[in-house]
Each structure stands twice: as structure tokens, then as C-alpha cells.
Image (cartoon, grey):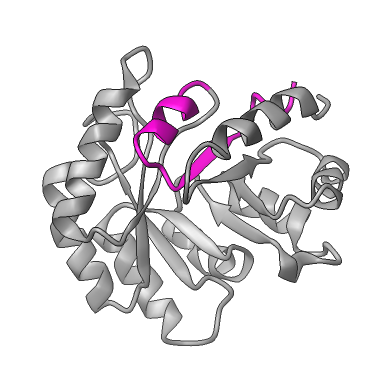
Amino acid sequence: MAINFKNLNSIIANIEKFNNSELMIVTKNQSVDDIKKLISSNFKLFGENRVQEAKIKYEDLVNRDKLKLHMIGPLQKNKVKVALRVFDTIQTIDRFTLVDEVGKILTRDIFRTKEFYIQVNIGNEVQKSGVKSKELKDLYSYSLNKGLNIVGLMCIPPNLEDPSEYFEQMLIIRDKINKNLKLSMGMSNDYEYALNLKSNIIRVGSLIFS
């Protein structure tokens, strides 16, 4: 796949209509050469789904310290230590046992990861990761008590449904917990809806690589 700069420029133009929103380029399954091309075009915010893939592609980049790399895929407990060394932000905190593991490891050393998002299963879908909305407040408080710097919430709405309803729910949920939390919502197929509903980060991959 090649970088579709036409689509990329169109996404950027849409983002510029809104305040306080930014583009995360999802580089899952993409080459290091393409990542370097994007970096040379002054893109600095990237997302990866898998710990080992991200480690291989990003760890040895010359200008790594100028980039921000977010984990946006499910995190297994046995990958926590590596993830904390690779990612600047982990967006997929979604269960109490994971918080326990992250909190325990954070006390042992200094890691790259400084910020966390909680992933919300906004559609209550069995096949998707994320904490249920009714358990979010408790997980948020628990995470803070365990030393995690929770700065935002992330969601993936159900496929084949109007995403606006779910993005609106995220706004309401966020405001009840902490109005200062960022929202990571919106992907290639629904990012325009998300921008209209105050998403701070949209996570786009397939539109850019085609």
C-alpha cells in the first residue's frame, strides 16, 4: 500500500475546521519506510495495535523522541512491561486486573508511558474490549488510586450503526466523570461525525494507506 496524500490532505482540512482536535495516523501493518515519509512530512502522532510490531518499527527510529506513539489495541498483562517502554500513551486500559498490573510495574522503574486512556465499550458489545459504561467511574477512580495518569477516554462504536449516538453518549459520560478528559473517538469510516462531536483525537489508518 502507498500513502494516499490526497485523502490525508482532505482529513487535515476537515480537522482544521475544529479547535482542539488532532490526527493520529494508525500505522498497523505499514512499513517503516512509509512511517519515515510521514515523519518527513512533519507528522508526529502515530498509533499501533500490537506491542511487538510497534517495538520493531519505532524503537530504533532516529527521531523517536520527537514522536508520540499511542497503543490503541488490546493490552495483555504479559505485555505490559514492554508496552510501557515502547508507547508514550496507552489508550486501552479496560479492566481492574490490567490496572493492577500496570500500577505494580510502574512502581519498579521509570518508563516511557506517561499517560493513559480508559477504553469504553460504548455499545456493550461482547466481541469488543472496553469497560462497560456503568463500571467506568469505578475503574477511573481505581486507576488514579493505582498511580495511572488517566488523561482521556477512548471508544469504538458499533459497526453499521449511526456513530453519532455513541459519540454523544461519550460526551455525556466524560462530562459526568471529568470534563477535562480528552476523547479519542472516530476512525476512517466515522471521523467526521467524531469531529462534530468534539473528539480530541481521531485515529485514521485505512483512508491514508490505500
How far across and how far down the image is residue 175, in percent?
19, 52
How far across and how far down the image is residue 189, in percent?
50, 21
Q: Looking at the image, which residue is at 73% across and 67% down?
A: 66
Q: Is residue 188 left or right of residue 61?
A: left
Q: Against 176, is 196 above or below?
A: above
How far across and how far down the image is residue 200, in percent?
44, 48
Quarter holding the N terminus is top right
How far across and how far down the image is residue 76, in percent?
44, 54
Can you tell which quarter of the image residue 137 is in?
Answer: bottom left
Q: Looking at the image, which residue is at 18% across and 43% down?
A: 172
Seen from this angle, which residue lies furthest left? 134
Q: Per the image, is 5 magenta?
A: no
Q: Per the image, is 205 magenta?
A: yes
Q: Is residue 116 left or right of residue 173?
A: right
- On the question of residue 100 being in view, the answer is yes
Quarter holding the C terminus is top right
For the magenta stretch, what is the residue range?
Answer: 189-210
Which residue is nearer to you in this view: 194 or 150?
A: 194
Q: Looking at the image, which residue is at 34% across and 35% down?
A: 197
